[in-house]
Every structure is written in structure tokens, then in C-alpha cells.
Amino acid sequence: MLIQILTALGALAAALVLGGMIVFAGLVARLVFAHLPDETANPLLRKLFPPYYKFMLGAAVAGALCLAASSRLIDAGLMAVVALGFALANWWFMPQAHRLADTRSPDRPDVEAAFMTIQHKTARLGLIQVAATAAVIIRLAVVAP
């Protein structure tokens, strides 16, 4: 009975992570940039991303721990990779992006290129996280323990 509860909690954590990523990146961030001027949107997202990354990191770690405790080691490993992605995004990519964004100007194409590189890396990381989390949810639905 405990194994089933832990597996269910791991599945709920994975669903929370997947839904959170899709809503935040696919809806919130896009709407903020679409409907607010840059001078409002940029500071707002700078305030939203750190708690988002930390919350999602916590949810992914919780999912990984529940799945590991229920002997779903592949799924736990995938959720651990997702958690690592949130840590990298929060403490590695985001500070780099902020430093570069603060020095962007039309006469600094090198800074703009570096900023766009970080943005693309972060987007690819997010896609990997979505795929890994979706894989966990699918595996939990179809792969017997």
C-alpha cells in the first residue's frame, strides 16, 4: 500500500511539474511579453522566474524521492534530471541572461548574440524537461512496477 501511495505522489509531482512548465512558459511568459511594454514585462519576469524555478525544483525533487522510494528508479532518475535542469536554469543560466540583458545595446551585437545563445539554451533545456517529465507520466501509466 505504501508503494502505491509513493508512486501516486510521484505521479502527482510529475504532473504538477509538467503542467507548471506548460502554463508558465507557454502561457504566462508569452502573455506578459505580448500585453505589457518591455520596461514592465522584463522586471516582472525577473521577479517571477526565481520563485518559479525554486518551486519547480522542489516539486521535481519531491517526485524523484517518492519514485525512488517506490523503486521506480528510471522514473526517479528522470525526475532528478528535471530537477537538475531547474537548478541550472535558476543558478547558472538566469544570472548569465540577466548580466547580458543589463548590457544589451544596439552597438553591442556580441552581447545580443550571447544573450540569444543563453535564451536558446534555456528553451532547449525546457523542452528536454517537458519531454522527460512527460515520459515519466507515460511510464507510470503503462509500465508495471
Image (cartoon, rainbow, N blue to C red):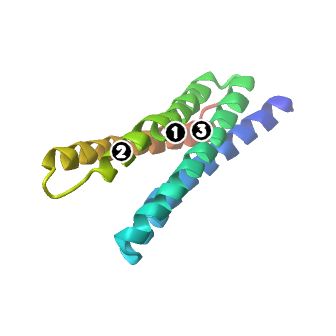
Q: Where is residue 1 drawn, in percent x and y?
A: 86, 32
- As measured in the structure, the alpha-carbon distance from the residue carrying label 3 to the one carrying label 1 is 27 Å
Which badge, 2 or 3, comes first in the chain's sequence?
Answer: 2
Do labels 2 and 3 touch, CB within 8 Å?
A: no
Badge 2 amino acid: Arg
* Res. 20 visible in picture: yes
Q: Is residue 131 above or below residue 23?
A: above
Q: Is residue 137 above or below residue 27?
A: above
Mark 3: few/some/many CA within 10 Å (<14, 14-19, 20+):
few
**Does dot 3 land on a helix, a strand or a loop?**
helix
Mark 1: few/some/many CA within 10 Å (<14, 14-19, 20+):
many
- Judge by depth and name the residue closer to the eye, 61 or 15: 61
Q: Name the residue beneath numbered marker 3.
A: 142
**Does dot 1 land on a helix, a strand or a loop?**
helix
| Residue shown at 51% from the left, 52% from the top | 49
**Does dot 2 land on a helix, a strand or a loop?**
helix
Q: Where is residue 37 drawn, in percent x and y?
A: 37, 74
| Residue shown at 36% from the left, 45% from the top | 99
Q: Where is residue 40 drawn, in percent x and y?
A: 43, 70
* Res. 125 visible in picture: no
- Judge by depth and name the residue closer to the eye, 129 or 42: 42
Name the mark nearer the viewer: 3 or 1: 1
- Judge by depth and name the residue closer to the eye, 104 or 65: 104
Q: Is residue 78 left or right of residue 111?
A: right
User: Could you say which quadrant of the image residue 126 lies in?
Assistant: top left
Question: Which label was assigned to residue 99?
Answer: 2
Q: Name the residue beneath numbered marker 1.
A: 86
Which badge, 3 or 1, comes first in the chain's sequence?
Answer: 1
Badge 3 amino acid: Val
Q: Is residue 54 left or right of residue 114?
A: right
Which corner quadrant holds the C terminus? Answer: top right
